[in-house]
Amino acid sequence: MADTEQGAILDRIREALSQVPGVAGLALGGSRARGTADQSSDVDVGVYYHRHDRPDIATLGAALARLDDDGDGGCTGYGEWGPWINGGGWLVVDGVKTDILLREIDRVRTVVEACVAGRPEIHYQVGHPHGFCTVIYAGEVHHNLPFHDPQGTLAELKTLTDPYPEPLATALVTRYGWESKFSLDTAATAAGRGDVAYVAGCAYRAVACLSQVLFAAAGRYLLNEKGAVTQAASLPSAPPGFRAGVEEALAALSTDPTDLKRCLARLAAVRADVLAGVRT
């Protein structure tokens, strides 16, 4: 999709949603904001609002339906997708898939300030198998491109995330460096029993933790588990063979205890390589 086509879609969205009472800001997010999109990439739009002045869902949903090519778009209720993905809707605008995500500015600010101070958290959230790490909010603020920000709120929040906060990097490397070892150690007994489901969960958890470590060490925000291993492998903080080692380990998973032990041993070696190159 050409920049002019994307710009036309954002203009339509701004015209429609900026008039909805309670909409405090709009920002382009996802791969298009980060400059990594391809022709098939969706347009992701964050709709920001204040806690005590949020848009009426019926009014917002009606505005989204008018944007949708088939008039079928709408909006979920607040919190319908879980505690951290506030809600939103799926549209097709001028033939392009467009995702709308709701974000409460007040909560985003609180979370970003905590991350900057080195106090990230992780919570259960549907759609995030590693859990919702609150660094995601900071990463969204950092990468998103506001296209409706009448009070300058989104621009001001962006200044908190650049440069990447050193206390945040230290906290993530420390926490997830430790958890990656704990996950592998706690899976050892289950591996001896051939408990592939438990070992697979622990192995995935270790891989997700190591990805967090590599992103933090490189001063980059990890926004999603999807593609995280591939992205982490390309970072200057990654040891040679990181992706290959992870894939080799996970490919060994089976009900055979010998295979499970081999998986854990391979991941332990990958972990050692990661931490050897990371300053803690």
Image: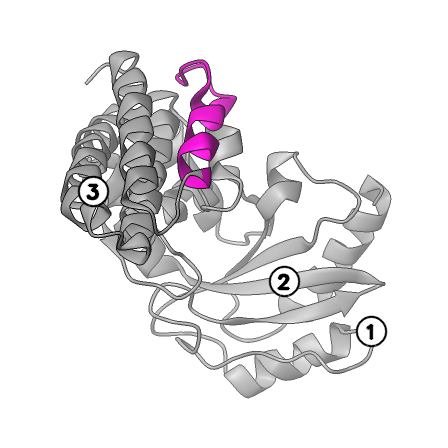
Q: Position of residue 56 (x, y in %)?
A: 50, 83
On screen, residue 168 above or below 6: above
Q: Which residue is mark 2?
A: 99
**Mark 2, secondary structure of its residue:** strand
Amino acid bearing label 2:
Asp
Q: Which residue is mark 1?
A: 69
Mark 3 is surrounded, within 10 Å at the Cα level, by few (under 14), some (14 to 19) or many (20 or more) other residues, namely many
Q: Position of residue 62 (x, y in %)?
A: 66, 84
In reply to whether residue 244 is colored magenta, the answer given is yes
The residue range painted magenta reads: 233-251
The residue under the point 82% across, 73% down is: 69
Let me know if residue 134 appears in the view.
no
In reply to whether residue 223 is colored magenta, the answer given is no
Amino acid bearing label 3:
Ser
Mark 1 is surrounded, within 10 Å at the Cα level, by few (under 14), some (14 to 19) or many (20 or more) other residues, namely some
Quarter holding residue 161: top left
Q: CA distance from mark 1 to mark 2?
A: 13 Å
The residue under the point 47% across, 20% down is: 235
Q: CA distance from mark 3 to mark 2?
A: 34 Å
Quarter holding residue 139: top left
Name the disc covering residue 183, or none. Answer: 3
Q: CA distance from mark 1 to mark 3?
A: 47 Å
Query: Which of disc 3 and disc 1 is earlier in sequence?
Result: 1
Q: Position of residue 224 (x, y in %)?
A: 46, 46
Let me know if residue 79 appears in the view.
yes
